[in-house]
Amino acid sequence: MTVTYARDGAIAIIEINNPPVNAASAALRAGLADAIGRFARDDLARVAILHCAGRTWIAGADISEFGKPPQPPLLPDVITQIEAMPKPVIAAMHGTALGGGLEVALGAHYRIAAAGAEMGLPEITLGILPGAGGTQRLPRLVGLAPALDLITSARRIGAEEALKIGLIDRIAEGDLNEAAREYAQSLVDAQAGPRPCAAMAPPQIDEDLVAGLRARLAKRYPGQIAQLRAVDSVVEGGLLPLQEGLAQEREKFTELMNSPQRSALIHAFLSERAVAHLPELEGVSPLDLTHLGVIGGGTMGAGIAASALLSGLAVTLTECDRPAADRAAGTVAGILRGAVKRGKITQSRCDAILAEKFTSADSYDALTDADLIIEAVFEKIEVKQQVFSALDRVAKPGAVLATNTSYLDVDCIAEMTSRPQDVIGLHFFSPAHVMRLLEVVAAGKTAPDVVATGFLLARRLGKIGVRAGNCDGFIGNRILTHYRAAADAMVLDGASPYQIDRAVTAFGFAMGPYAVSDLAGLDIGYFTRQRRAPDRHPRDRIPVFADRLYELGRLGRKTGRGYYIHDEDSRGGREDPELADLLTQVRAELGLVEKSFTDDEIVARYMAAMVNEGARAVADGTALRPLDVDVVMLNGYGFPRWRGGPMHWADQYGLASILKDIEGYSREDDHFWQAAPLLRQLVESGRDFADLNRGKTA
């Protein structure tokens, strides 16, 4: 049974057992309502303890019910039933009490938690607000400021902080269930009654505090609505009796449930869990992974090493000589010290990691015991091939040999070894110890257990692994090349790079393409264009202005000038008035007549190019499903999460509208603007990308 009822003397024991995370499913809600009813009718029971079997308290909603009509009893009704009990109810929490799980605890009258328990209300990350009383009971219990912080930040807090703000009454010393029974008995002995949040006065509304929070939220989450609606619910509810406050909370919850942003954020949430489920890996076990080798101690290599060390892996990092190895070791140590400053690890753990888990060396011979070796050297095929030729001689049999390339052909790299089945691409994103995305690139001969090991590494590092096929740029950079080409073409035709950046960020991107170039370095794009030059089509439009900036030594932030001027007076860069003259000169040399673009036109072309190439990547198997494209763009390229990813956005915008846009653009340039056959096929068959995610053919 999902919920059981028992009694020990005057203490009723209500146990929830819905593995693996005690999700608040319809069966759990019904069982809990029934058990609470039994407690009400049990005249010998004076107090009830709600606790959960397994590794956690109720950890939130049941994911399998997302997008389906709600089944009674609804969670708010069950919580109200608990709160209305004329006898005390204690919530005994361990593991994670999140979302609806924490709201159940708020409906109880007393709360005790295990020392390691964590609590939080993460609903805004899904585009909704706590809809089972969280915006009403929490402020009454802990006060306005702590409640608004927890609700709008979606952060988790530990038992110590929960006790400090009054969210819980006790932290269990030793066994939670035993401590909860002692607590219950003390209530019986004291003849204590229930202590519902409904009987507590709402907090005073501090208008200055609320106004300041609204301003910060609007700046931090531009375009998003859930955060501000949650503030509305707390503030409006604070002026009403609880039942009326709960009613207005439910109205706002329902409004958000029906919003496109909620749909997009749920899609992102579910897609990030779906990307690791690959038919090709069913029944395939990954290889052992305890010792990681990293070749190259630059920004990327050091970041990979630090990420692995923080996950518990042993790491050996090699460089070309001892001084370089020492510099790399210093970079890794600096990253770990940064983790100490941010409270991620203790100083003692940092010291132990560096002393016991980390080694730097100046020879590949130090990698002979590594289970997986990641090459992170200069992005040049000849350099990487030399590394793999050497690795083939020193790596132990069965070791996974991985290249951290952004664009290059993994098959050409694997050819340099006698074991291409052990070679894989692992495309990390910079900074590697921060960015969550890892493209797992399966080359032509990569063995399934090696692919499985790539996904194991992603999980160990706390990253989202996405399987990508082997092509120039894989999923993300391949698509980036196309939407960046669309942006460059608009600049050639008369748009300002600054207008494009403003339009794209107003759409929701974290940064515009030209600000990104300055951050990454204009030399990266220049070298990529040079590498591709021999295969360039005569009708490809070359961003001559970008080459001119490179030739002028304007490489972006690292040189102080790129598209923007970067100095002490300009956080993030300021517009360069000299750029307009350079663009005018380039257009004149190319014989181009300048025209203007509206912001909407810029976004339409930018997104059409992105979606069109995403459709091609899905069609040729570079990406398995549209959702894989979405996850890559969300986690590696700053795509606005509240729009769900480009393929989800395309479904909402309308594939027929995108196809019509592309056909219109093709009248100007029928070389670049060619509709992907898959896009046309979906429109003609009345299907969309979501159908492909569900396994339906086009």
Image (cartoon, grey):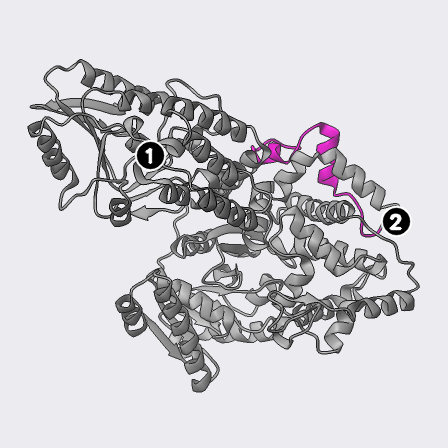
The stretch of residues the image draws in magenta is 671-698
676 in the magenta segment:
yes
Mark nearer the N terminus (1 vs 2) = 1
Point out residue 13 in the picture as x, y percentages from the top left corner.
16, 26
Q: Amino acid at mark 1?
A: Arg
Q: Amino acid at mark 2?
A: Glu
Asked if one can make out residue 625 in the rendered structure from this viewpoint, the answer is no
Q: Is residue 4 left or right of residue 567?
A: left
Instruction: Relative to 442, say whether 34 is above or below.
Output: above
Residue depicted at 68% across the width and 43% down the height: 615
Point out residue 391 in the picture as x, y percentages from the top left corner.
47, 73
Secondary structure beneath dot 1 equals: helix
Q: Nearer the viewer, mark 1 or mark 2?
A: 1
Point out residue 339 in the picture as x, y percentages from the top left corner.
38, 64
The mark found on residue 668 in the picture is 2
Asked if one can make out residue 175 in the rendered structure from this viewpoint, the answer is yes
Q: Quadrant of residue 656?
A: top right
- Residue topped by disc 1: 140
The reply to whether the C-beta atoms of the residues labelled 1 and 2 are less than 8 Å apart is no
Q: Is residue 461 left or right of residue 36?
A: right
Point out residue 450 in the picture as x, y percentages from the top left corner.
45, 56
Few, some or many residues within 10 Å of mark 2 (<14, 14–19, 20+): few
Quarter holding the N terminus is: top left
99 in the magenta segment:
no
